[in-house]
Image: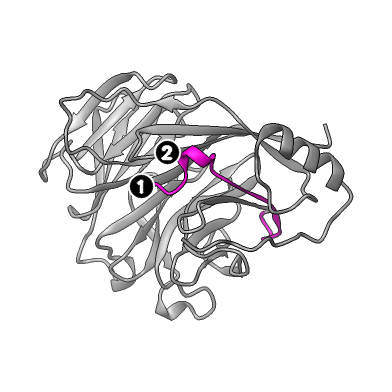
Amino acid sequence: MKIRPIFPLRRCRTAVSLLLTACATGIFCSSVSAQVVPRPGRVVQIEYPETHTGSWLQAVSINSRGEFYLTDTGLNRIIKTDSSGAILLEIGGFGWENEQFDQPLDIWAENALDVYVVDYNNNRIQRFDRNLNYVTSIVNDETRPAELQFAFPRALTVSLFGDVFVIETENGRVIKFDAEGRPLISFGDYDSGGGQLDMPYSICVAGEDDVFITDQRLQSVIRFDYYGNFLQEFGNEVLKSPGPAVIVAAKLAVFDEELERIFLFEKDGELIVDFALPPSEQRTQGAFDLTAAGNRLYLLDGSRRTVLSWTLQSLDH
């Protein structure tokens, strides 16, 4: 495990205040100049039955009701829990029929109405209602133009308008679908010039504005506008293996899997603060994923079947 050097930020006006707050909460921040402090909250233990051997929790999403939706790639299942981690519903199993999966890698359920699941090896996105009743699927159509075809989806997010943005690994790009599952545009592939993706991992969209993609090979975040136009690349000064990303309290949170730190950026790429996991949670070999609700940030540690949380508090209040 490489030890990350400390990277100071440019602002210093709140240095003493943040330093005292960070020490009081046990958070290790790389900068004492940030105006946002992550305060650690409770740890939720996912109450998975002992009989579910071979499970591997991969991804998590929280809705506005405080319910968690998780993917289990080991058992090819989708799980819904309450806010305390107690299981409410389960569906799935290995297969290619509706409500079956072959490596469900990502999940989105933020609007408390829809649940979208990346079904990697089945080359599709399955859509459910919040009670995990099957609704429809987004699948490839070989009659479409080549730039709108996809295979092996890796991650997804949904905008306020209901548009679905999908990272597909066959061509290393993003395809944007409308709410009915019709492909609209693709971007980020080798024809993109600036903004060409190399190993895209995670994607999130800031309301009706920008789209952010973490790229593990580029060791950075790539920012596009809502229509797929490249805007900027940032984070490569501090990131080593950027993984899951999410919008929280109008900021971009990125978990670095090698450094085991969470980085918080402004939308324009300015680093606000970064902090380590609690010592007891470090150096695990599990799958990690981020989700958020309001000003609360959640991190799934799949190997421990736990969800950690932080509340982002502004020092200006």
CA–CA distance in space, label 1 to label 2: 8 Å
Which image quarter holds the C terminus?
Answer: top right
Query: Crowdedness of circle 2 by 10 Å Cα count: few (<14), some, many (20+)?
Result: many
Q: Is residue 284 above or below residue 52?
A: below
Q: How many marks?
A: 2
Q: Which residues are magenta?
A: 267-284
Residue shown at 53%/61% (left/top)? 227
**Foreground pick, 278 / 67:** 278
Residue shown at 41%/46% (left/top)? 288
Question: What amino acid is at disc 2?
Answer: Leu
**Foreground pick, 162 / 6:** 6
**Foreground pick, 107 / 297:** 297
The residue that label 1 is drawn on is 287
Percent x, y for residue 186?
A: 41, 66
Residue shown at 26%/41% (left/top)? 56
Q: Quadrant of residue 6?
A: bottom right
The residue that label 2 is drawn on is 300
What scheme was used to colour the molecule? Answer: one colour
Q: Earlier in the sequence, mark 1 or mark 2?
A: 1
Element type at mark 2: strand
Element type at mark 1: loop
Question: What amino acid is at disc 1?
Answer: Ala
